[in-house]
Amino acid sequence: MTRGADGFGRATRSLHWIMAAGILGTFALGAYIARMEVGLGNLWLFGLHKTLGISLLALAFARMTWHLLRPPPGPLPGPPLWEMRLARVTHRSLYALMLAVPVSGWAYASATGLDVLIFSGLKLPPIAPVSEVWEDGLHLVHRTLTWTLLALVALHVAGALKRALIARDGTLARMIFG
Amino acid sequence: MRAAAALGVSFRSIPRFQDKAMQTRIFRRTALALLGTAAAARVLSVAAGRDIIGPAEAAPARYVLDPGRSSVRFETDFGEDKITGGMPVSAADLTLDFANVANCRVRVRLDVSRASASFPFAAQALKGPKVLDARSWPHIDFQSSTVRRNGDGALVDGDITIRGVTRPVTLDAAIYRQSGTVAGDLSRLTVQLAARVNRSDFGATGWADMVSDEVRIDILARVDQAA
């Protein structure tokens, strides 16, 4: 993959931006379907939300595998140590949540007792017991993890903007241009 | 007893389940009767049972279900749409007395485990633990307690058991001759029973935010007089 010594390759950048769009889109869809009046005409949106979520889970695995095979370059120097540590914790938490949010959604869907269908017909095995207690609990877990993920995305964006607009050190540029 | 009129000349307006051919026949007869022809009048009186149901035939008669030609349909609101579906009648035991409606007895058992619905998720939700919990409660049972006349039909008070919870319910009943039978022939009948229940009364509360509480049930039982 094309990259300079400190740059990100095309695969890494593609995965980053596709997942960024996917996470925001899936969140927006999830927030919408949680509030809409459900009917025959919009029932498919639940399937779309699951399809997107499980696709993002697969992409998260692909991304982590890719980083193991081709470790990305470390952070550009500059910020104080606490900021560097905060950035590292944020990145690790983001990866953990990119796995945990879709898995918690899958578990929540399993607990309803309905088939978990993605891509309009692919049935995922249930990964949680069917019970209203589990359903309510997992719904809360899915919501809480999702909001945590969004908070961390906001922190991540804030850090990237700080480096792009205040430090102007090329950190954001290498995620865009390599 | 005028309840016998329900047999051949029930003009209950447009039941949801219609024995089409039979209704056509009823309407044709009505038209003829209105024309006032002597023949039609006789058909009507035969249909009403006055000629052929003598004292002997008026005694309570037992009927058994023809399961292949019987069905239960239900309907409930789902947002702006409806969920419809069906359930096989696994048993029905009826004793009908056209001379004295109060002697009628109705018992119906529905097979929840073979319920169907208008889309796959609905069928799964319906039979799952949050609604009918078919694994624990494979049947819905109805047993009549009192049968009252209501126009050409009857109101059947009784108890319905859903999810193991028994509640009083009133079924709106109509009885028709089946198509292919002659007026006054009581050997094969079509019994239509309609009811409304609130599923929350029975603990069937799943998806209450999406699916309406009230469920409308229509039972169409084709029955044969027991030998």
Image: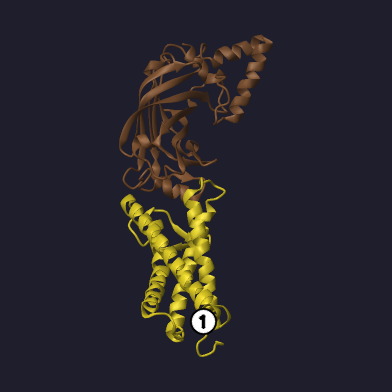
- Please tell me in which quadrant of the rendered image residue B168 appears: top left
Would residue A101 be visible to someone looking at this image? yes
Residue closer to the observer: B218 or A19? A19
Quadrant including the C terminus of chain B = top left
The brown-tinted chain is B
Q: Is residue A113 left or right of residue B52?
A: left
Tell me: residue B188, above or below residue A46: above
Name the residue: 38% across, 71% down: A93
Tell me: residue B131, above or below residue B12: below
Q: Position of residue B111 (x, y in %)?
A: 39, 41
Name the residue: 33% across, 48% down: B135
Q: Disc 1 designates what residue?
A: A169
Name the chain letter of the residue that bears numbered label 1.
Answer: A
Q: Position of residue B129 (x, y in %)?
A: 35, 47
- Identify residue type, mark 1: Asp
Residue closer to the observer: B198 or A91? A91
